[in-house]
Image (spheres, rainbow, N blue to C red):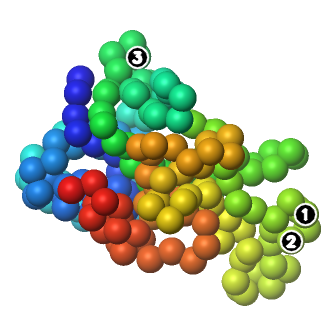
Amino acid sequence: MKFDVVIIGGGLAGLTAGVELCRAGVGCAAVAEGLSIHNAPMKEYVDAGGVLLSGDSVVRGEWEGNRLLRVFTRNLENTPLEAGNFIISTGKFFSLGLRSDMNGIYEPVFDCDVLYDADRENWVNPDFWGVQPFETFGVRTDAEGRVYVKGVPSVNLYAAGEILAGKVDIVKSALEVCRKLK
């Protein structure tokens, strides 16, 4: 299946980007694994002409150099989703967009570079109600919003929403990516 843009993640950032892109005539598919507290844009996205693959998740991508060519999902198995551009907006830890183990923090689908403090003792604030450092960890992007993979910026994989490093305005980050892809 071919689209102009494939969105990986169906939360507020991903579907906000999808609505904007569909309204601009860009053909989009969004792969949304589960329900989000930000499901409000879902109906708007579908009404705008977006294809929603609800209850599915991207399991891997196929690359040519630093260009993502296609992704494969759990439900579609060997039927790829191909696109000129991709947006990853899978969130951080609670939505499993980022994961951690004893070796560090990683992005599980494409192995995107993640910015985080290597000293595990600095990951959390002992004051439970205080600002938590891990909330600022996220994927590394260039000035255009393209994700780094193995130290090199991808040609066509962009990031939006909470998966980004730093303090993020979810909707603003999605709209910024849209301006680049319209």
Q: Position of residue 155 (x, y in %)?
A: 45, 43
Q: Where residue 119 is drawn, which disc sits there?
A: 1
Q: Is residue 56 left or right of residue 46?
A: right
Q: Position of residue 147 (x, y in %)?
A: 53, 51
Q: Position of residue 177 (x, y in %)?
A: 35, 61
The residue located at (23%, 27%) in the rendering is 2
- Distance, label 2 to label 1, CA atoms, is 6 Å
The image quarter in which residue 130 lies? bottom right
Instruction: Tell me which label, 2 or 3, sits earlier in the chain.
Output: 3
Q: Amino acid at mark 2?
A: Asn
Few, some or many C-alpha atoms within 10 Å of disc 1 (few <14, some 14-19, many ≥20)? Answer: few
Decide: is 162 above or below 80.
below
The local secondary structure at tag 1 comes to loop
Q: Is residue 84 left or right of residue 20?
A: right
Q: Quadrant of the C terminus?
A: bottom left
Q: Where residue 77 is drawn, which disc sits there?
A: 3
Q: Amino acid at mark 1?
A: Asp
The residue located at (9%, 50%) in the rendering is 25
Q: Nearer the viewer, residue 53 or 26?
A: 26
Q: Which residue is mark 2?
A: 122
The residue located at (35%, 51%) in the rendering is 10
